[in-house]
Image (tube, grey):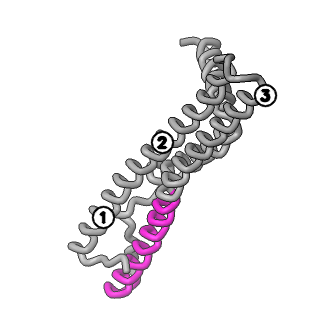
């Protein structure tokens, strides 16, 4: 692929995304924000420099009991950060379907308002409101489902690491 074809593809994607957001109405912007925030939190799992299973701060100059305590503190801090990010994903995955429902109600209101103004005999009037309602519902459900799956697998990862650390003798108190 050439640079020009990549730039053209990105431009087409941006145009399609903005058109999709435009169809869904004003509620699509908070949904898009939820999606970006959730992606940022998910990137914390993938790109964060620490790994909970290997967060150890052993130094040669400290006694073993102090090294063990420093390891426990470092592990607790890593768990707290991971759980904080996980709670954010869980919250966003609950908010997204509610925003989709808000978009559904907004689309139905727009449809009935346009029907009252122009009459219900024009299918374009009715279909614009229904389209807005369905696009926001679909987007909210998609973001919510993705976030719930992400939170489930993230929680399983944290539980597995915590079990391993309990066996090794490290306690994330």
Which numbered disc, 2 or 3, marks the residue that appears first in the sequence? 3
Q: CA distance from mark 2 to mark 1?
A: 27 Å
Is 170 covered by the magenta stretch?
Answer: no
Residue where numbered disc 2 is placed: 141
The answer to whether residue 102 is above or below residue 73 is: above
Q: Mark yes or no: residue 14 visible.
A: no
Range shown magenta: 62-88
In front: mark 2 or mark 1?
A: 2
Residue where numbered disc 1 is placed: 159
- In the image, 64 versus 7, the foreground residue is 7
The answer to whether residue 79 is above or below residue 13 is: below
Which numbered disc, 2 or 1, marks the residue that appears first in the sequence? 2
In front: mark 1 or mark 3?
A: 3
- In the image, 128 versus 155, the foreground residue is 128
The answer to whether residue 160 is above or below residue 58 is: above
Mark 2 vs 3: CB contact within 8 A = no
Residue ID at (70%, 39%): 26
In the rendered image, the quadrant that contains the C terminus is bottom left
Residue ID at (74%, 30%): 116
């Amino acid at each position: 692929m050439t640079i020009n074809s990549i730039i053209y593809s990105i431009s087409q994607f941006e145009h399609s995304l903005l058109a999709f957001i435009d169809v869904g109405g004003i509620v699509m912007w908070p949904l898009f924000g939820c999606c970006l925030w959730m992606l940022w939190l998910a990137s914390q799992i993938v790109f964060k420099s620490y790994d909970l299973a290997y967060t150890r701060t052993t130094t040669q100059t400290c006694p073993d009991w102090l090294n063990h305590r420093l390891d426990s503190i470092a592990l607790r801090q890593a768990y707290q950060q991971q759980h904080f990010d996980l709670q954010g994903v869980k919250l966003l995955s609950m908010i997204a379907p509610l925003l989709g429902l808000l978009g559904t109600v907004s689309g139905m209101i727009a449809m009935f308002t346009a029907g009252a103004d122009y009459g219900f005999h024009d299918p374009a009037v009715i279909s614009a409101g229904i389209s807005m309602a369905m696009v926001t519902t679909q987007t909210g459900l998609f973001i919510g489902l993705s976030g719930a799956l992400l939170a489930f697998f993230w929680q399983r990862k944290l539980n597995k690491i915590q079990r391993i650390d309990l066996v090794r003798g490290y306690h994330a108190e």
